[in-house]
Structures are given as C-alpha cells and as structure tokens.
Amino acid sequence: MPAIVPAFQRIGEENAFAVLARATELSRAGRDIVNLGIGQPDFPTPPHIVEAAIQALRDGHHGYTPANGILPLREAVSADLHRRFSVEVSPESVMVVPGGKVTMFMAILMFGEPGAEILYPDPGFPIYRSMIEFTGATPVPVPIREANGFAFSAEETLALITPRTRLLILNSPANPTGGVTPKAEIDRLVAGLEAHPHVAIMSDEIYGTMTYDGEAHVSLLTYPSIRDRLIYLDGASKTYAMTGWRLGWSVWPKPFYDAARKLAVNSHSCVNAATQWAGIAALNGPQDAVHAMMSAFDTRRRLVVEGLNRLPGVSCITPKGAFYAFPNITATGWKAKPLASALLEDAGVATIGGPDFGVHGEGYIRLSYANSAENIARALERMGEFLERRRAA
C-alpha cells in the first residue's frame, strides 16, 4: 500500500461539519434537531443574484476565466472597498477565489515552513491551525479572552512575535466569538507592527459587514503603513448568503500577488464563470436583502444572549459582530465538548464545543444564531430543561 506523506497526518478538521453530519443523521432517524452549529445564513441568496447567474449561463459564460477572476468582478470588488472604507484598491491586486478558505490556504502555504512561526487567533477558525501544521510551521496561538470582549490584545499579540514569525492572522469580527476589536486596539497593533517589517499579515474580514450596536468595522486595508505586506480576505458567503456558491476574493500586495495567481493556476484554475457574474450583481446591486438579514440577526442576537444568561451555570457577553454567541459554561460543571455532544444527543440541539476552535476555547460552546427566532427559542428551552435535569440528578 503506498504511503501518504507525513504532512497529511497533520491536517485537522472543521468539526462544525462533523456536527452537521451527526445532526443530519439524527434528523433522518426521526429526531427533531435544532441546528445552532453550522455557521451559515438561513436566508436564501437574494433573487437578483440568482438571476444574474442564470443569465450568465444563458449568455454563454460556460468556459474558463482568468485564474485571478474576470475583470468586471475585480473592478466591482475594488469599487465596493472604496465605498466601504474610502481606500484605493487596484483591480490588479484583487484575486477571485472559490471561498474564503482558499485565501487562508494560499497565505499559509506562502509563509509556512519548518522553522517558521505563524500567529493565529485562539479561539479561532480551526482551519488556521490545521493549515499551519500542514506546512510544518509552528502554530503560535494568540489568546482571545472574554475579559477583553473577545477582541485581540495588541500588547499580547506583539509580545508573541519573534524573529521566526512569518505571518500574523487576524480576524475581526470574529468566528467563533462574535468579538469585534475596537479601532484604538487596532491602531496600537499596527503601530507596533512597524517594528516587525518581516511579518506578513492576513486579515480575515469575511464578517466585515456584520456588526451591531453602531459598532464600525475597521479594515486593516485603511492602514497605509502595512499595505505592502497585508493580505485582505473577504467574500460573498456570509454577507450575501452564498455559502454554497463558493465565491471569495482577496487583496494582495504586489510582491505576493503573482505567487497567489500561480497557486490558483496549479490548484483550481479559476472560479466558475456564472458564480463570478453573480458576484458582480451582489456587489453592484441592491443591498436591501443584506440589511434585512442583518436586522433579523440583530433580533436573534438579543434573543439568544438573553436566553443563554437565564440558563443555569451559563453566562454570555453580547457579541458585537458575525452571527455567533460564545457562552461561558464553566459554572455548569461540564467540559465543553462533552456538553455539546450531550446537548445534541439528549436535547436535540446542535452546538460546537469551544475546544474545536483552540485550546483557549475550553469552558465555552459556540451557538450560531443564523436560524429562526422560533428555533432559537426552542433550542434555549431544551438546553434549559437539559441543564436543570442534569443538575437535579
């Protein structure tokens, strides 16, 4: 039997998909499951975006496109970034990719190797650490603490940089915590990074349109001093409820861009043509559906936080972004992953244990409120009954 190279033994998982598979299996067996595990908007893709893809197919857009994406979409991304952040981004620095993960994959491959260190948020999106370990680089977790509102600490982050640090990964608004890092903290981080010109930065801003309570999203693109080493990650999945379309985009500094293009050529060739035309409609078309979705998420956010704080042994700070709550469950007496498993198997509520997002995730579970208010209310009721029953036992 041929042996797979050892690097593949280091690849991890995204356990949200394992939980989804188990929840689906239980549903097929007749169980009533409320899924608050998967990070996916429960809204359909807006109709004008769907129609744009259909029209593109009718118009004959059936072939390969340039590896970096069609120019009209790259121009639409540039225009959108200018509208949102008042920054100048050349379409020649925009890379269209099949989902946000591909930008992570490219950036980590570009800077990860044995002997290198890559800093990443913990708790954070599990693919960060998985891909760092795949490259042979040393993953260095940057603690994301509840006491800090689940924002990263500039001081703590900068203290972890060494001469071996090659890449710093940042994420705000954040998965799994819903934390949003304030501008003052980002200012301090960027000022400190000026002393570390050997460190590239990847800013995962896939939830950048999803903030609440008047909280403004601050993009790393607005800091000229780091633009020559900044990789910006974004896409259509969350903002436009297009997770299954697999459409992402990124902005690369000139020294890195051609390497990313070559990775695209060698891996996926290009993003499918019709999806790219749909992306143009998403960015250039009406944003009413986005605003309506965010209004619904805000209502659900308040519902889930109020409900979680009524549960025995559970406390939850109010998330400022994305569509996740990250309640503290230490006072329940449960470890996080066993509790998440028991809630699914016994109470019919799918959640994700905090350690699936890193070592600093112990003591927490993640709930996605990308589900209906009615389902969230049912889930909270079931969780309360389960915790009361187990406490009484």
Image (spheres, rainbow, N blue to C red):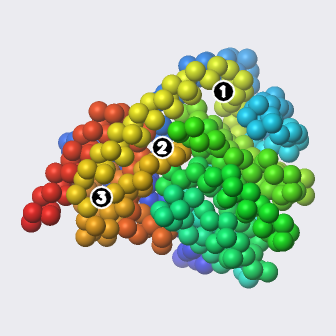
Kind of residue at badge 1: Ala
Q: Nearer the viewer, mark 2 or mark 1?
A: 2
Q: Position of residue 127 (x, y in %)?
A: 57, 61
Marks 2 and 1, how far apart at CA: 20 Å
Q: Residue at x 80, y 31 (%)?
A: 79
Q: Nearer the viewer, residue 149 or 171?
A: 149
User: Which of the two labelled residues, at mark 2 and mark 1, occupies the earlier sequence position?
Assistant: 1
Kind of residue at badge 2: Phe
Splitting the image into 4 quarters, where does residue 334 fall?
A: bottom left
Splitting the image into 4 quarters, where does residue 380 fall?
A: top left
Mark number, residue 314 = 3
Q: Residue at x 79, y 66 (%)?
A: 193
SS assignment at label 1: helix
SS assignment at label 3: loop
For label 1, the residue is 282
Q: Do we see residue 263 in this rendering?
A: no
Mark number, residue 323 = 2
